[in-house]
Image: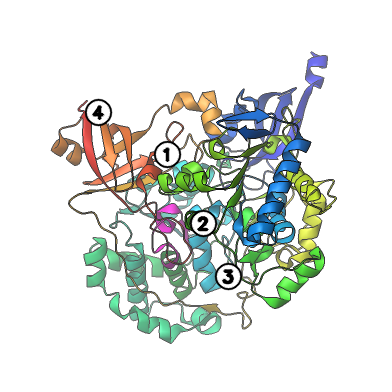
């Protein structure tokens, strides 16, 4: 028994399945994952985890893992050694750069990979290739939240820690299916509601679990959150319920903002949102009466044409009511991928260096030019959406995608995969032969979190260490190793031996992470950015004013110009989102047999009214048709959805039905696809 015991290793890691960032010990014996054991000192989760964190790890031992680099030969792939693959990729990149210029190449980073790997991807693009064409999947989800917060309060992150949410007197959830998407945060909210009488208001199209538990649930018409938020803010100001002292001391542009609210009357809001004037008044009264308000939101807000503006409206409301600069208040955009926060923080963005410093800023750019001994373009690069468009236009001919299933998660998927087919040279780095990888010229086998060292940053800006628990499978390698070797092949000897050296470099160049070091991140220690040079971190943002020169936040006037509606041909609206058991595009969770058993096939939720009208029953089969594509699903009749609203889970078996239906509509400020604005018609294939 003692012998057996000895072979069990316990390694601290961080969950890769959502932005909560639960940490725990993973018990392994050889390659077998025995159990996951959260610790009391786990900063984000204590001793809790959810089903994904607990059971979702067997994918690392999937037989389908890529173990060798692959190069396309006609219509099939051939296994090659690393030196062959890397010298081939380096040569093609060099040739394309020489022939068409560096901006003919594009790079997409992974929000599942580590901070250090995001840093290296943008360094590779900017230093080795010489382009700012680098982005990550926050473009598909959270960019609008970041934008809305930047504009108003200057930092695009959660205002406080997850723990602080428990201290709020009132929590408002908007467009967030928290119980399924951020389970551990949801259980904190449920607990505070039950034990301390915390008020919970939920605004969503669909009455999911949090909607059912809420003290008040509202279902505004799709895409109209900006209107009720602005009307409630206006009403609060008009009644003199705003926090005048806070506004006078910490907020700019009040008069101009107040003026801009003119059109957001209660009558106007009632007409557009469907929430009655009486309810709007009550919402305003309730918000104004509590001392501490925290607002959580997610994709139901951001994945709209007005995603950035709606996020801005949330921040405006928080400013008017003085709900910043304290514990237990503020803005909580709930990040989806485990490292969606960190991937942007560490610079895989076309317009920002790490720490959200603009590439257009001469002083900042010079700092990087000096450190990297290179010339960097002042002009921002292309984001994901613009890169796909540029391929269609012929100005981008090479793409390097690391750990993203762009061929499933991007909107209007037929348009995206057509673009892949037009590429001269396409490199995909992943754990599996993903749908995206099927279009590649070269596939490089990467290693998942359990097979490497590094750091992730969760939704509360918390940087945490993960330690290598297993050896990489076959010849696969961590992304940071692959990028370092590829850079060397192209003549740039970075010389990193360990991710800590990459973090040291990032910290030396980026004021936001000035004091971050692996020493301070040992074990379950963590740091929430901004981190001062002396290692002081910031569990609560803005304690000392806002990061603008005058330390004051800015109110941002908004318009509501919205041009989406269903019509005679496409008469049903499709809402969509996550289910508890799966992770985004599912390329890890689908490989987990335990999870696949629980959630076998794509379904669509149909309201009892609509089911009756169309003569269909539970288990019927329908085809949904939009102007871009179609998808076949099994019907689940439920009163979670109303009237002509349909709900599709993002995760179906191996495909995303949603993205055969979505189109090229985007948030006007960030190019985030408006996934939540899909109009379809329904053809019945089988009535039951
Ligand atoms: Fe925690 Fe999210 Fe992982 Fe669940 S999926 S264990 S809530 S980090």
Q: Quadrant of ligand 1?
A: top right
- Alpha-carbon distance for marks 4 and 1? 19 Å
| Spot occupied by residue 679 in the image (x, y as percentages of width and height) | 28, 50
Give the residues drawn in magenta, as a range. Answer: 293-309
Q: Nearer the viewer, residue 7 or 294?
A: 7
Q: Earlier in the sequence, mark 3 or mark 1?
A: 3
Nearer the viewer's eye, disc 3 or disc 2?
Answer: 2
| Spot occupied by residue 84 in the image (x, y as percentages of width and height) | 75, 36
Q: Which residue is mark 3?
A: 325
Residue 182 versus residue 349 in the image, above or below:
above
Within 10 Å of the Cα at label 2, are there few (<14), some (14-19), or many (20+) other Cα atoms?
A: few
Is 580 on the left or on the right of 639, as rendered? right
Q: Which residue is mark 4?
A: 620
Q: Earlier in the sequence, mark 4 or mark 3?
A: 3
Q: Earlier in the sequence, mark 4 or mark 1?
A: 4
Q: Does ligand 1 reach within 8 Å of label 3's beta carbon?
A: no
Q: Secondary structure at mark 4?
A: loop
Q: Nearer the viewer, residue 609 or 576?
A: 576
Q: Which residue is mark 2?
A: 394
- Alpha-carbon distance for marks 2 and 4? 44 Å
Q: Which residue is mark 1?
A: 656
View extreme (bottom): residue: 255
| Spot occupied by residue 520 in the image (x, y as percentages of width and height) | 80, 53
């Amino acid at each position: 028994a003692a012998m057996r015991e000895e072979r069990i290793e316990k390694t601290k890691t961080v969950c890769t399945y959502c932005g909560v960032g639960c940490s725990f010990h993973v018990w392994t014996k050889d390659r077998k994952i025995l159990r996951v054991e959260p610790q009391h000192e786990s900063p984000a989760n204590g001793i809790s985890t959810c089903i994904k964190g607990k059971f979702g790890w067997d994918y690392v031992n999937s037989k389908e893992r890529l173990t060798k680099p692959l190069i396309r030969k006609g219509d099939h792939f051939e296994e090659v050694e690393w030196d062959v693959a890397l010298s081939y990729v380096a040569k093609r990149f060099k040739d394309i750069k020489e022939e068409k210029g560096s901006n003919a190449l594009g790079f997409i980073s992974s929000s599942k990979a580590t901070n250090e790997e995001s840093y290296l991807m943008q360094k590779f693009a900017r230093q080795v290739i010489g382009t700012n064409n680098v982005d990550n999947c926050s473009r598909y989800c959270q960019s609008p939240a970041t934008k809305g917060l930047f504009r108003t309060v200057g930092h695009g992150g959660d205002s406080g820690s997850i723990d602080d949410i428990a201290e709020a007197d009132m929590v408002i959830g908007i467009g967030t299916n928290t119980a399924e998407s951020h389970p551990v945060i949801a259980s904190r909210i449920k607990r505070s509601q039950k034990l301390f009488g915390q008020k919970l208001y939920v605004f969503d199209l669909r009455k999911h679990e949090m909607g059912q538990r809420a003290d008040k649930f509202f279902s505004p018409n799709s895409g109209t959150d900006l209107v009720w938020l602005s009307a409630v803010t206006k009403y609060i100001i008009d009644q003199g319920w705003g926090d005048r002292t806070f506004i006078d001391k910490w907020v700019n542009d009040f008069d101009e903002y107040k003026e801009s609210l003119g059109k957001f009357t209660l009558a106007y809001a009632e007409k557009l949102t469907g929430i009655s004037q009486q309810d709007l008044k009550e919402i305003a009264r309730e918000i104004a009466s509590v001392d501490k308000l925290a607002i959580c939101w997610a994709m139901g807000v951001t994945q709209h044409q007005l995603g950035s503006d709606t996020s801005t409206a949330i921040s405006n409301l928080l400013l008017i009511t003085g709900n910043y600069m304290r514990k237990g208040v503020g803005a909580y955009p709930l990040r989806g991928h485990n490292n969606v926060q960190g991937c942007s923080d560490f610079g895989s963005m076309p317009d920002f260096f790490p720490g959200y410093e603009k590439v257009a800023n001469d002083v900042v750019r010079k700092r990087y030019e000096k450190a990297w001994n290179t010339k960097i373009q002042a002009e921002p690069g292309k984001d994901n959406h613009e890169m796909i468009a540029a391929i269609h236009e012929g100005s981008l001919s090479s793409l390097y995608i690391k750990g993203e299933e762009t061929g499933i998660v991007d909107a209007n998927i037929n348009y995206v995969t057509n673009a892949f087919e037009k590429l001269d040279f396409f490199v995909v780095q992943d754990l599996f032969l993903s749908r995206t990888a099927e279009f590649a010229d070269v596939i490089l086998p990467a290693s998942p979190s359990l097979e490497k060292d590094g750091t992730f940053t969760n939704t509360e800006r918390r940087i945490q260490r993960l330690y290598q628990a297993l050896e990489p499978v076959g010849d696969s390698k961590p992304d940071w190793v692959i990028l370092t070797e590829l850079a060397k092949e192209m003549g740039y000897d970075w010389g990193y031996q360990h991710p800590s050296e990459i973090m040291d470099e990032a910290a030396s160049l980026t004021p936001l992470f000035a004091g971050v070091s692996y020493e301070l991140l040992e074990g379950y220690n963590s740091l929430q950015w901004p981190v001062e040079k002396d290692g002081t971190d910031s569990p609560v943002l803005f304690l000392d004013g806002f990061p603008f020169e005058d330390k004051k936040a800015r109110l941002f006037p908004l318009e509501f110009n919205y041009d989406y509606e269903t019509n005679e041909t496409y008469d049903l609206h499709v809402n969509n989102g996550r289910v508890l058991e799966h992770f985004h595009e599912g390329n890890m969770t689908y490989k987990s047999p335990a999870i696949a058993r629980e959630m076998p096939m794509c379904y669509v939720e149909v309201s009892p009214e609509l089911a009756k009208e169309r003569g269909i029953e539970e288990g019927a089969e329908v085809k949904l048709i939009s102007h871009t594509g179609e998808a076949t699903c099994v019907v689940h009749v439920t009163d979670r959805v109303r009237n002509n609203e349909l709900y599709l889970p993002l995760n179906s078996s191996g495909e995303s039905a949603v993205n055969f239906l979505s189109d090229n509509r985007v948030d006007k400020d960030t190019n985030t696809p408006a996934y939540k604005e899909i109009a379809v018609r329904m053809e019945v294939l089988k009535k039951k």
